[in-house]
Amino acid sequence: MKRQFDDLQLGSIELFCLAAELSSFTAAAVAAGVTPAAVSRSVSRLEERLGVRLFVRTTRQIRLTDEGRSYYEQSRTALAQLVDAERQISGQHATPAGRLRISLPTPYAHYRVLPVLPAFRERYPEVEIDVHISNRNVDFADDTYDLSVRGRAPDDSTLIARKLEDAEMVVVATPGYLRRHGTPQTLEELAAHECIQFERPSSGRRLAWTFKVEGEEIEIPTTGSYGTSEDALGGATLARAGAGLFQTYRFVVEQDLRDGSLVEVLQQFGGNTRPFVLLYPHARHVSRRVRAFVDFLVEKFEG
């Protein structure tokens, strides 16, 4: 096989990836134990070799160009494969290591994944974790995430989907709200109540509430004076303040239900669930830290 890279070029790619991750030549230089000028020269060599600009440079910051982002994503994957290959051959493959980037929706982040991350790092102390918390879908082709958790599996054959759990939905309100406005006994009575709304980020539409009636799941449009978007936990905070009824995941309010600060209503129409799915790119080579994290979450939540 004809040699494509010399040692200097491979080192330049490593320094380029480090600068891209840290958004700074200076920070990359400190992390690599070289001078900022050495990082700058390495990036310039790559740009000359490729014939494109990899960074937009200003006096205050650097940022990847579109070509730079594409080159970074592919280079990062290639370098990670080399590291894993060396670990496997040298017998170090039992210890996943490196930086793991995950994207999580707000409720699942705060009430499911973030609380168990210390246990994951205790098991795999050489793995560093960056968490992106947002209810918007991420594009693995454009973003630099290794995994994401979302509410459904997209129609995308390039992604592997593992369902973690079916999370039960409940409708809750404070005892004070129910004293003032009464406790609904039927789904039709929701029309007379303040039903706190959540706007779906993907469509901008307000999310219908779901219930089970005679074993069939149905959707009920509701109305209310309070609307939230982006952060699904905003509705739970409003409900705790006595603003109205709110439908949310049981795991978000289970402590409130235990201590009586919130009350579950319409239990006879409960039992409906929404899924949470773990997504990651389908590839012949999946890094050991990704495999370790997938196995860890499945162990914790799959059911």
Image: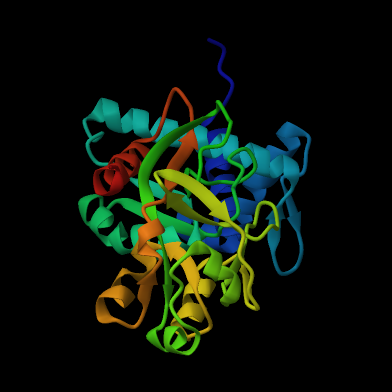
**Does residue 182 appear to the left or right of 168 in the view shown?**
right
At x 69%, y 52%, the residue is 203
Q: Quadrant of residue 83?
A: top left
Residue 8 visible at all: no
**Does residue 58 appear to the left or right of 28 in the view shown?**
right
Number of numbered markers: 0
Q: Which quarter shows the C terminus? A: top left
Give the camera-side residue of 187 and 110. 187
At x 61%, y 65%, the residue is 222
Q: Could you say where residue 154 lies in the image, as x and y percent from the top left? A: 56, 36
Give the camera-side residue of 13 and 40. 13
Indicate whether 29 appears above or below 287.
below
Indicate whether 74 appears above or below 144.
above
Please, which residue is most extreme toward the top here?
Answer: 1
Q: According to the image, what is the colour scheme of the structure? A: rainbow
Indicate whether 187 appears above or below 92.
below
Residue 131 visible at all: yes
Q: Could you say where residue 120 lies in the image, as x and y percent from the top left? A: 27, 53
